[in-house]
Image (spheres, rainbow, N blue to C red):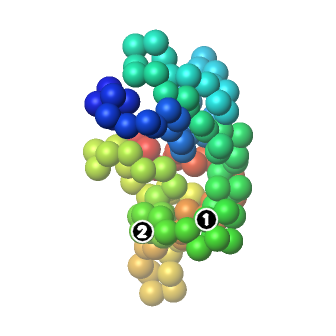
Amino acid sequence: MQKLKNETKISAIFMGTRSGDLPKHVVLNECQMTDQDWPQFMRISPLLKWSYSQIWSFIRDNHVLYCSLYDRGYTSVGSTRNTTPNPLLKFIARNGETYYMPAFMLTNEDKERNGRT
């Protein structure tokens, strides 16, 4: 980051953080400087107050490309050691096979991280 700061005229960075991604004690504003122990950039977080369903509506309405894991029932992607499809999206087909609905089908936004251990 420091190299980027030193070698470019970049002064602001867009973040994809939502308030629900943060620990409860962390408070961010839509525009604020990075922490003191980081190179100084303005952090711009336009999605900070967006909900899970608002994110998915935007993605689908605007045909935004996204990771294909979300089409296989993953609603929150971490590492390969702590991420599985969300069990709330699981269904058994008539042939007895187990499948998962895509992430945008999740109706309870509070359960977005149910596939994380």
Residue at 55% over, 62% down: 103
Quadrant position of the C terminus in the picture = top left
Instruction: State whether residue 37 appears in this view.
Output: yes
Mark 2 falls on what kind of element? helix
Quarter location, residue 59? bottom right
Q: Nearer the viewer, residue 67 or 35?
A: 35
Upstream in sequence: badge 2 or badge 1: 1
Asked if one can make out residue 21 in the rendered structure from this viewpoint, the answer is no
Instruction: Check disc 2 and report the residue beneath it.
Output: 68
Question: Seen in the image, is 15 located left or right of residue 67?
Answer: right
Residue at disc 1, secondary structure: helix
Q: Quadrant of residue 105?
A: bottom right
Badge 2 density bin: few <14, some 14–19, many ≥20, Cα 10 Å: few
Amino acid type, label 2: Ser
Closest to the observer, 89 or 36: 36
Give the residue at mark 1: 59
Identify the residue at image location x=45%, y=87%: 95
Give how far across and how far down residue 99 sits, in percent.
46, 73
Q: Say which quadrant the N terminus sits in.
A: top left
The residue at the point 64 percent across, 56 percent down is: 55
- Distance between mark 2 and mark 1 Cα atoms: 13 Å
